[in-house]
Image (cartoon, grey):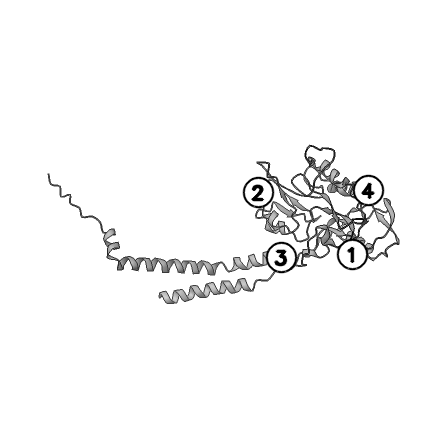
Amino acid sequence: MKRRDFLKATAGGATAALCGIGTAEARENKEPLENAIGILYDATLCVGCKACVRACKEINGLPPSIMGEDVQYDAARDVSGDTYNVIKVYKNGTSEAKDREIDGFSFAKKSCMHCVDPACVSACPVTALDKNPQTGIVQYNPDVCIGCRNCMVACPYNIPQYEYNDPRGQIQKCQFCNQAGVERISQGLLPGCAEVCPTGATLFGTRRELLEEAKRRLAAKPGETYTYARGRASDGLHTHDKEAPEYRQHVYGERELGGTQVMHIAGVPLNRLGLPELPERSYASIAEGVQHTLYKGMIAPAIALAGLAFVVKRNTSKADQDDPQSQNSRRPEPNNDRGES
């Protein structure tokens, strides 16, 4: 094959590869599992007692996060290798009224969202993070993890946390208190945060029933008496009555990035509570669509690279032939050893 024809062929292959990248399409979002479990956090019910933080640490054997030498209470301000669940507060102006955006305040909960189509699972190269096929829990296997921390970069909620102070550090995150050695869900128990919440602000159940409950609350007329469940959404015994607040008409986690199994409702805009505004299309579906297209077209770049290597080698050889000094430098020295004595 002539060099000109070869270059045309490699250029055509490279163009085809680039065209394939340009037409890459995201796959569809994954659908919620039939029996996926989850949590509904209602910020209007939260009183900021942090009982959920204490229970989480007690059940999972996590040390308190202290401020200075003060060990009277857990002072965790965000999720970390020692904190899977944290309560924060939003304040504005005089902060005189709860669940009001202007001159008000609201509590907020931060923990793993257990995404329906999780970016951390998609980004993990060794499946140390995966999604339980029955419960939908995004679970972590430390025996497989290689410590690359791709999951930390991929998570839009900044949830997976690495133990930087431990030479054998692992990724830490909420697993609904059902990881090996704890396994509360498998035993028919509740996650610690939902079990101890005194107002039902953290409510456990299937994703389907939690979403239905969230929409009922949003439809309630402000000021009317509403019966709130505690612990488990399906529990009709442990309830309390309270006047329904004026909710923002948004169930966060219903559609964000394909949906999550932990959902939030509140009386103030959800972005004020640290929940980012996100599209409905999951990042995992976009990334995997591009990756699969790239892999299919890798043969074209490989051919192009081989062609370039061939041209470079030919040009280098021609340059050496045209350069007498280069030829002399390669000519072997004459052998003057004639065996004379």
- C-alpha span from label 1 to label 4: 23 Å
Residue 25 spot, x, y in % from top left: 59, 62
Labels 2 and 4: the sequence-earlier one = 2
Is there CB contact under 8 Å for labels 2 and 4?
A: no
**Tag 2: amino acid:** Gly
Report the mark closest to the observer, 1 or 4: 1
**Tag 4: amino acid:** Pro
Q: Up-down: is 191 above or below 35?
A: above
Residue 42 visible in the current orientation: no
Report the mark closest to the observer, 2 or 3: 2
Q: Residues within 10 Å of mark 4 (few under 14, many from 20)?
A: some
Label 2 secondary element = loop
- Which residue occupies the foreground of this view, 142 or 53? 53
Labels 4 and 3: the sequence-earlier one = 4
- Which residue occupies the foreground of this view, 99 or 145? 99
The residue identified by callout 1 is 248
Left or right of residue 5: residue 150: right
- C-alpha span from label 1 to label 3: 29 Å
Residue 118 spot, x, y in % from top left: 65, 51
The residue identified by callout 2 is 147
The residue identified by callout 3 is 285
